[in-house]
Image (cartoon, rainbow, N blue to C red):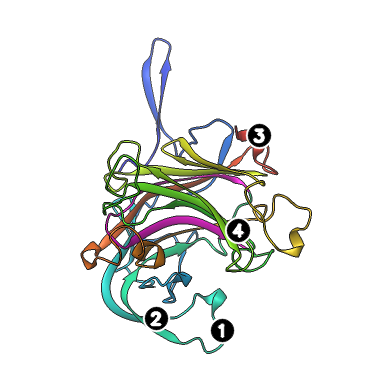
Amino acid sequence: MRRLEILIISMLGLGACEFELSEPVSSQVGWELVWFDEFDGTDLDRTKWLPEQSCWGGGNNERQCYTDRPANIFVADGLLHLRGQKEEFTGPLMPPELASNGDRPRQQQYTSGKIRSKGLASWKYGKIEVRAKVPAGQGLWPAVWMMPEDPVYGSWPLSGEIDILETVNIGAFCDECPDSDIENRTVSAIHFGGSPPNNDVVDQKTPFASGGLPSDDFVIYGVEWGEGLIKFFINGDEHLRVGPEDWFTTSELASGNPNAPFDKPFYLMANLAVGGKWPEESNELGLDEGSVPADFLIDWIRVYQCAEDRETGRACMQ
């Protein structure tokens, strides 16, 4: 993989000179790089990420245990691999922040990988871009998403959730996909509202622009998030825009604040779920065991903030 951006400067009478930048640069003027991982080397950078270890299924009846093993999370050839595979595994039921005293173990029939920047890095407003290649297969559910570092407004979803990228069942039969009978859509979403079942969501399912599958090649997924505005992108094209008129929280702490709950620092996550309510109730239904082993590949993740307006981020947004 090409690891560094190359800047070519033409100089009068001297031809072209090449300079390798030590950091990637944003494609849009005004955004300043504040954090990134190019996934070089051979080890996960644990100053930026910690793997989640849990078998609870994320509240979605997912079938995997997330583990902290090279079998499920590894860096090679300039890529992060989050690998889902079929194997019997017993691990902790809940992640540490949700575990209670005497948290019991759970056995699952699949394993996979999930990394989080929780406790290491979080941001209030900014631009996040991810270059990734999602896996195809009925029952596979890769995602890059954000959750509040401190759930000020209450437990999920009162404090919000931002989903930059999700796909389910790529390549499976789809009877509701426009202009195609094959699932090829990318989903971006926000979750908010009251405690279940009074939670709500705004999402957008966008077919892959080339007419192929997002699993065919690497794609750049992004979000721009500022005070009172969140925009989602696929390869630079906006496909979802939401504002305070679209979201709410029932938290009493948000009274009179239209930007709540999306006005606090959020951290990043990336994972590959195997099975779960959403994929198994969609497309060809269930989980095709032939979908695994499968890798969710991430080339890089970059976080920018608005250099002139870190307080709201809006000076860098259209």
Distance in Å between CA atoms under marks 1 and 4: 25 Å
Distance in Å between CA atoms under marks 2 and 1: 15 Å
Q: Using the image, tell me which numbered label, if any, was put on residue 192.
A: 4
Q: Amino acid at mark 4?
A: Phe
Q: Earlier in the sequence, mark 2 or mark 3?
A: 2
Residue 72 in sight in this render: yes
Q: Which residue is mark 2?
A: 91
Is-magenta flag for residue 153?
A: no
Q: Earlier in the sequence, mark 2 or mark 4?
A: 2
Q: What residue sits 59% from the left and 66% below the top?
A: 156
Q: Residues within 10 Å of mark 3 (few under 14, many from 20)?
A: some
Q: Residues within 10 Å of mark 1 (few under 14, many from 20)?
A: few
In the visual, does 149 lie left or right of 268? right
Q: What residue sits 39% from the left and 81% below the top?
A: 91
Q: Position of residue 90 (x, y in %)?
A: 35, 82
Q: Quadrant of residue 250?
A: bottom right
Q: Position of residue 254 (x, y in %)?
A: 74, 58
Q: Position of residue 301 (x, y in %)?
A: 45, 49
In the visual, does 53 lie left or right of 172? right
Viewer-side label of 2, 4: 4
Q: Earlier in the sequence, mark 2 or mark 1?
A: 2
Q: Which residues are magenta?
A: 125-149
Query: Please, what secondary structure does the residue beneath circle 1 have?
Result: loop
Q: Which residue is mark 1?
A: 100
Q: Earlier in the sequence, mark 3 or mark 4?
A: 4
Distance in Å between CA atoms under marks 2 and 4: 30 Å
Q: Using the image, tell me which numbered label, if any, was put on residue 315.
A: 3
Query: Please, what secondary structure does the residue beneath circle 3 have?
Result: helix
Please name whichever residue, 246 or 28, is drawn nearer the observer in this view of the structure: 246
Q: Residue furthest bottom?
A: 102
